Image: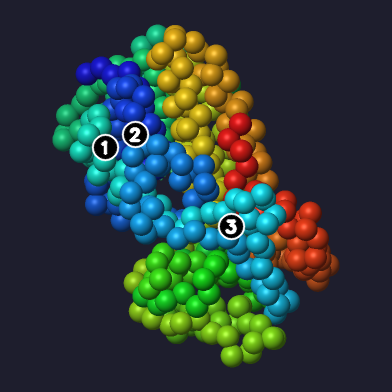
Amino acid sequence: MRTTVGIVGGGPSGLLLARLLHRAGIDSVVLESRDRAYVERRQRAGILEQATVDALCAAGAGGRLAREGIVHDGIELRYDRRAHRVDFPSLTGGRRVWVYAQTEVVKDLIALQLAEGGPLFFGAEVHAVEGADTAQPVIRYTHEGREHSLTCDYVVGCDGFHGVARTAVPEQVRSTYERSYPYSWLGVLAEAPPVHDELVYAHSERGFALASMRSPQVSRLYLQVPNGTDPAHWSDERIWDELDARFALDSDPAWRLNRGTVTAKSVLPMRSSVTEPMRYGRVFLAGDAAHIVPPTGAKGLNLAAADVIVLARALGAWHESGSVELLDAYSDTCLRRVWRAEQFSYFMTTTLHTDPGQSGFDTRLQLSQLDRIATSPHAAAELAENYTGLPLG
Ligand code: APR
Ligand code: PHB
């Protein structure tokens, strides 16, 4: 089999890229190792920058998003048992974010691709990408028990953190920069109406907590927990009590979350990682295949979308005129934005979480930084600009 762009991985990066290429008249094939139900069920983050929403609309996947997505104009920070709201539009010249779950984005993109796009194969496990430095790279994969190969003009590795495409970049030219964190998140999905109409990020002596949402009826909640935590040790009652303790306010001692049935519970590790370069020969890396951020800044999905927007433009220019200038610039263009998001995600994570080895001095630095955001429009604007998303470049 042969195609113009072979896409390894059918997560948000691979699917959005396939849609954008389809709209530009460029053929592609998406190979996804898991089945459709698994990919559609995976619970991930849910904050979309405006540029991500614009790209989903350009890809034809804006319909349900426009009906069910919720626009947010700010977030609340809680620290020292006080609340402070960061207002995005006034600090950024009108920018805001959308709340719409990644799992819904994935469902919308899959439905469209199957209805009108190029081939999307589930259960297609890629085991090698060969010939990155030749004119015709080849993807080798197994589908329905048989070995196949797909010859391409370009290959894009959208196969996430544990993918294989990264290894098409030879070790001598590949560098990975990483950091892990001494805590994880316990993520909870609950049939409980969110109390507050915006996201609440809490720094507390007991550790970080986040109140997010999926709809007016469904809350998504997170608690900082030690690495290696077994979610089975957290009963529903313990989760609700701990969340209430971490969100406690002196000004409103009666403030409580609405409780409801917990429908999912899982522990997520926190990691930062960047692989450079994001391109070698005719193989490109996009999304989690090239970089991971801890979820505190809500940047993972948006970075993945930014990569494929830049790549779709570059492939579009090559398709129209034969020019490879934008393709040559892809890795540098993306990495500038990636490192900014890495810094922001690190900043949000280390400012809001309690490191088990943290001293009283460290805690006071965190509180001083949060107070700075609450009292200085400059400090607040820095947060708001990064959170709502920097220009694509
Ligand atoms: N062959 C085929 N598919 C593969 C292979 C392989 N060898 N290895 C991994 N995959 C698939 C995975 O099953 C997954 O569906 O690649 C896909 C990668 O998807 P994601 O991990 O969701 O990565 P990406 O599309 O870049 O999306 C990034 O996901 O992890 C979140 O926070 C992150 O929101 C960000 C987004
Ligand atoms: C989510 O809704 O899942 C979510 C929101 C904001 C974050 C992380 C996760 O920073």
| Rendered residue at 60%/82% (across/down) | 245
Residue 247 shows in the view: yes
**Is 341 rendered above or below residue 298?**
above
Q: Does the beta carbon of the residue at mark 3 sit less than 8 Å from ligand 2?
A: yes
Q: Which quarter of the picture shows residue 25? A: top left
Q: Nearer the viewer, mark 2 or mark 3?
A: 2
Q: For the residue carrying disc 1, how many other residues have a C-alpha within 10 Å: few (<14), some (14-19), or many (20+)?
A: many
* Residue 148 or residue 188, whichever sits in front: 188
Residue 19's disc is 2
Residue at which label 3 appears = 296
Q: Amino acid at mark 2?
A: Arg
Q: Position of residue 233 (x, y in %)?
A: 44, 76
Please give the name of the residue rendered at 62% of the width and 42% of the height, measured from the top-left corner: 390
Q: Position of residue 380 (x, y in %)?
A: 73, 58
Tell me if label 1 and label 2 are in contact, CB under 8 Å.
yes
| Alpha-carbon span between mark 2 and mark 3 | 28 Å
Mark 2 residue element: helix
- Earlier residue among tags 1 and 2: 2
Q: Quadrant of the C terminus?
A: top right
